[in-house]
Image (spheres, rainbow, N blue to C red):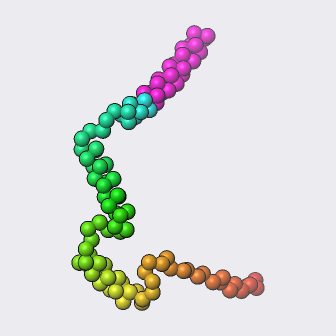
Amino acid sequence: MALNKLFLLSSALRSAVSLTLRRNIGISAVLFNRAKELDPIQKLFLDKIKDYNAKSKISGGIVEGGASYQKNVSEEVTKLQRLYGGGDLAKFPDFKFPEPKLEEVAK
Protein backbone atom coordinates (compact mmCIF):
# COMPACT_ATOMS: atom_id res chain seq x y z
CA MET A 1 0.00 0.00 0.00
CA ALA A 2 2.71 2.48 1.01
CA LEU A 3 4.85 1.33 -1.90
CA ASN A 4 1.97 2.02 -4.30
CA LYS A 5 1.51 5.58 -2.93
CA LEU A 6 5.24 6.18 -3.15
CA PHE A 7 5.21 4.98 -6.78
CA LEU A 8 2.31 7.35 -7.65
CA LEU A 9 4.06 10.26 -5.93
CA SER A 10 7.25 9.41 -7.78
CA SER A 11 5.37 9.33 -11.08
CA ALA A 12 3.77 12.74 -10.44
CA LEU A 13 7.10 14.21 -9.41
CA ARG A 14 8.79 12.78 -12.51
CA SER A 15 6.15 14.30 -14.83
CA ALA A 16 6.41 17.71 -13.12
CA VAL A 17 10.19 17.71 -13.42
CA SER A 18 9.95 16.60 -17.04
CA LEU A 19 7.54 19.41 -17.87
CA THR A 20 9.71 22.00 -16.16
CA LEU A 21 12.83 20.83 -17.97
CA ARG A 22 11.07 20.87 -21.34
CA ARG A 23 9.88 24.44 -20.77
CA ASN A 24 13.30 25.61 -19.66
CA ILE A 25 14.98 23.98 -22.64
CA GLY A 26 12.44 25.62 -24.97
CA ILE A 27 13.06 29.05 -23.49
CA SER A 28 16.81 28.67 -23.51
CA ALA A 29 16.72 27.61 -27.18
CA VAL A 30 15.00 30.88 -28.07
CA LEU A 31 17.55 32.87 -26.09
CA PHE A 32 20.46 31.07 -27.71
CA ASN A 33 19.02 31.74 -31.17
CA ARG A 34 18.75 35.45 -30.41
CA ALA A 35 22.35 35.51 -29.29
CA LYS A 36 23.53 33.96 -32.56
CA GLU A 37 23.76 35.87 -35.80
CA LEU A 38 20.65 35.70 -37.98
CA ASP A 39 20.74 33.63 -41.10
CA PRO A 40 21.54 35.63 -44.27
CA ILE A 41 17.97 35.69 -45.60
CA GLN A 42 16.54 37.00 -42.32
CA LYS A 43 19.32 39.57 -42.08
CA LEU A 44 18.68 40.76 -45.65
CA PHE A 45 14.92 41.00 -44.96
CA LEU A 46 15.45 43.01 -41.77
CA ASP A 47 17.95 45.29 -43.49
CA LYS A 48 15.46 46.02 -46.28
CA ILE A 49 12.71 46.79 -43.76
CA LYS A 50 15.00 49.16 -41.83
CA ASP A 51 16.07 50.82 -45.08
CA TYR A 52 12.46 51.31 -46.19
CA ASN A 53 11.54 52.70 -42.77
CA ALA A 54 14.36 55.26 -42.96
CA LYS A 55 13.36 56.29 -46.51
CA SER A 56 9.68 56.63 -45.58
CA LYS A 57 10.54 58.89 -42.63
CA ILE A 58 12.61 61.10 -44.93
CA SER A 59 9.96 61.29 -47.66
CA GLY A 60 7.05 61.56 -45.22
CA GLY A 61 4.96 58.87 -46.87
CA ILE A 62 5.18 56.26 -49.58
CA VAL A 63 8.72 55.68 -50.84
CA GLU A 64 9.22 56.33 -54.56
CA GLY A 65 5.50 56.97 -55.05
CA GLY A 66 5.81 59.63 -57.71
CA ALA A 67 3.14 61.64 -59.49
CA SER A 68 1.36 58.63 -60.97
CA TYR A 69 0.84 57.16 -57.50
CA GLN A 70 -0.60 60.44 -56.21
CA LYS A 71 -2.86 60.64 -59.26
CA ASN A 72 -4.17 57.10 -58.68
CA VAL A 73 -4.78 57.81 -54.99
CA SER A 74 -6.72 60.99 -55.73
CA GLU A 75 -8.84 59.18 -58.36
CA GLU A 76 -9.68 56.40 -55.90
CA VAL A 77 -10.56 58.92 -53.19
CA THR A 78 -12.93 60.76 -55.52
CA LYS A 79 -14.56 57.43 -56.48
CA LEU A 80 -15.08 56.55 -52.83
CA GLN A 81 -16.49 60.00 -52.04
CA ARG A 82 -18.89 59.69 -54.94
CA LEU A 83 -19.97 56.19 -53.87
CA TYR A 84 -20.42 56.96 -50.19
CA GLY A 85 -21.75 60.49 -50.30
CA GLY A 86 -18.63 62.61 -49.83
CA GLY A 87 -17.18 63.62 -46.52
CA ASP A 88 -13.69 63.37 -45.16
CA LEU A 89 -12.42 59.83 -45.74
CA ALA A 90 -9.40 60.30 -43.50
CA LYS A 91 -11.60 60.94 -40.45
CA PHE A 92 -13.27 58.14 -38.53
CA PRO A 93 -17.06 58.47 -38.82
CA ASP A 94 -19.16 59.59 -35.87
CA PHE A 95 -21.83 57.12 -34.93
CA LYS A 96 -24.83 58.37 -32.98
CA PHE A 97 -27.14 55.90 -31.36
CA PRO A 98 -30.12 57.68 -29.83
CA GLU A 99 -31.79 56.13 -26.82
CA PRO A 100 -34.89 54.21 -27.88
CA LYS A 101 -38.20 55.36 -26.49
CA LEU A 102 -39.66 52.52 -24.52
CA GLU A 103 -43.31 52.35 -23.60
CA GLU A 104 -44.62 50.41 -20.68
CA VAL A 105 -47.12 47.76 -21.68
CA ALA A 106 -50.01 47.03 -19.33
CA LYS A 107 -50.71 43.37 -18.60
100 or 95, which is in the foreground? 95
User: Residue 64, how many percent across, how many down?
Assistant: 26, 68
Q: Which of 103 and 62 is in front in this view?
A: 62
Please say whether residue 22 is one of the residues in the magenta stretch: yes
Whole-percent x, y for residue 6 in the image: 58, 13
Task: Please state if 18 lies on the left or on the right of 77 as rendered.
Answer: right
Residue 41, image x, y percentages: 24, 44
Frontmost residue, 64 versus 45: 64
Please give the name of the residue rendered at 35% of the width and 82% of the height, measured from the top-left corner: 77
The region drawn magenta spans 1-26
Work out whether residue 85 can be spotted: yes
- The quadrant of the picture occupied by the N terminus is top right
Is residue 52 positioned above or below 78 on the image? above
Name the side, left or right, on which 10 lies relative to 49. right
Q: For residue 4, what is the image quadrant?
A: top right
- Tell me the quarter of the picture where residue 82 sits: bottom left
Residue depicted at x 35% and y 58%: 53
